Amino acid sequence: MTGVCFSCTIHHGGHHYGESRNRKKKPLTKIEIVAATEMSKAEREKIEKQYDGNQEKLRKELPRVLKCANAIPGLFRGPSIYFHHKALLESKERFLSPEHLETIYAVLPSWGMHRMGGDAKVCSFNEFKTSILDSSENEETINDLKTIDDYLSKIENTKKRNVATIEKLGEKVSKIAKLISQIKASSSDSHLVSASKTLHHILPNLVPPIDREYSVRFMKKECPFVTGQKNQVNVNKDHKALAEIFITGMLNFFNSDEWKNIVKDITLIEPNRSIHEVGAFNTSLPKMFDNLIVAFVKLHNVDKKKRNSFMKVVNEVLKK
């Protein structure tokens, strides 16, 4: 299959994929991403259309979904929160040190990888470390992106950080997607999930964590959602193209009127060792996008028992 070149643009109020690059540019509100991938044009357009439709539903319910998203840590207590915050602290204090990499390595199983009987297995630590540190190209890319990530982390006003994220990240989507395809954190051939979770704890303000149960399902499947181990969404190919589509869609969401009207009132949580449960995963804008997707998928599960179970957790956490 030959590679397909495409450009993605971002405008106010929603997604506009595959626009002509000859169209007149608008400052800050248009981002072009040109990438060669192995995904067919028809498949890409199908995924983008589904992703766009689910985002539209999410934006319409944003206040409700955001409230539930703040309670997401109630579903993933203990090591999921602890190692997430610890890895982010290590990123600030000892970037890509052995301690930082070891903490990220601990995050992966606490975030759902390496389950007994599951397909997603974490690779050996030496393989993991080598794929990050022993490639001059990867090292150069990470250092380049780290400068941008640090710049974004210093913007305390979330409205201004949101604008800067759209501008800065929009220029680097293809580079990040390529990096995701080259980081080996899993023993399987699928790099999307393991590499995005790894890179999120290296570049938290640029790379969103992506998983099959929520992120890819939200991107590829119709709402309401059928979830569970028996209904996993395949991501064993086209991980670079899927990363490009997912991150570009995230930027479109950040550029929507609904999000921009609400982001000014959001306070991001600094990573710390004394973690309060409510909002504990609101550590960056990309992580907040992930939290919203998790909440939305759970709120729109076809299984009523699963919906009720989620709302029980939400109500318990928000009462604290």
Image (cartoon, helix red, strand yellow):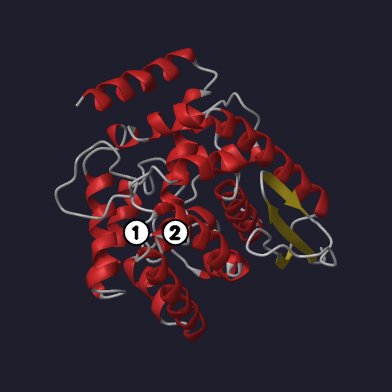
**Image quadrant containing the C terminus:** top left
Q: Is residue 187 visible?
A: no
Residue furthest to the left in view is 274
Question: Where in the figure is residue 120, as x and y percent of width and height?
Answer: 45, 49
- The amino acid type, in three-letter code, at marker 1 is Glu
The Cα–Cα distance between marks 2 and 1, rounded to whole angstroms, is 7 Å
Q: Residue at x 59, y 42 (%)?
A: 257
Q: Indicate the secondary structure of the residue bearing disc 1.
A: loop
The count of marks equals: 2
Residue under label 1, please give it: 156
**Image quadrant containing the N terminus:** bottom right
Residue under label 2, please give it: 161
Taking depth in this image into account, of 48 and 103 the one nearest to the observer is: 48
Rate crowding at label 1 as few (under 14), some (14 to 19) or many (20 or more) other CA atoms within 10 Å. Answer: few
Q: Residue at x 54, y 65 (%)?
A: 169
Q: Is residue 83 visible?
A: yes
Taking depth in this image into account, of 72 and 97 the one nearest to the observer is: 72
Q: Is the residue under label 1 in contact with that under label 2 (CB below 8 Å)? A: yes
Taking depth in this image into account, of 23 and 106 the one nearest to the observer is: 23
Q: Residue at x 76, y 62 (%)?
A: 7
Question: Where in the figure is residue 126, as x and y percent of width and height?
Answer: 34, 72
Rate crowding at label 2 as few (under 14), some (14 to 19) or many (20 or more) other CA atoms within 10 Å. Answer: many
Question: Where in the figure is residue 219, as x and y percent of width and height?
Answer: 62, 42
- The amino acid type, in three-letter code, at marker 2 is Arg
Q: Earlier in the sequence, mark 2 or mark 1?
A: 1
- Residue 291 shown left or right of residue 1 in the figure: left
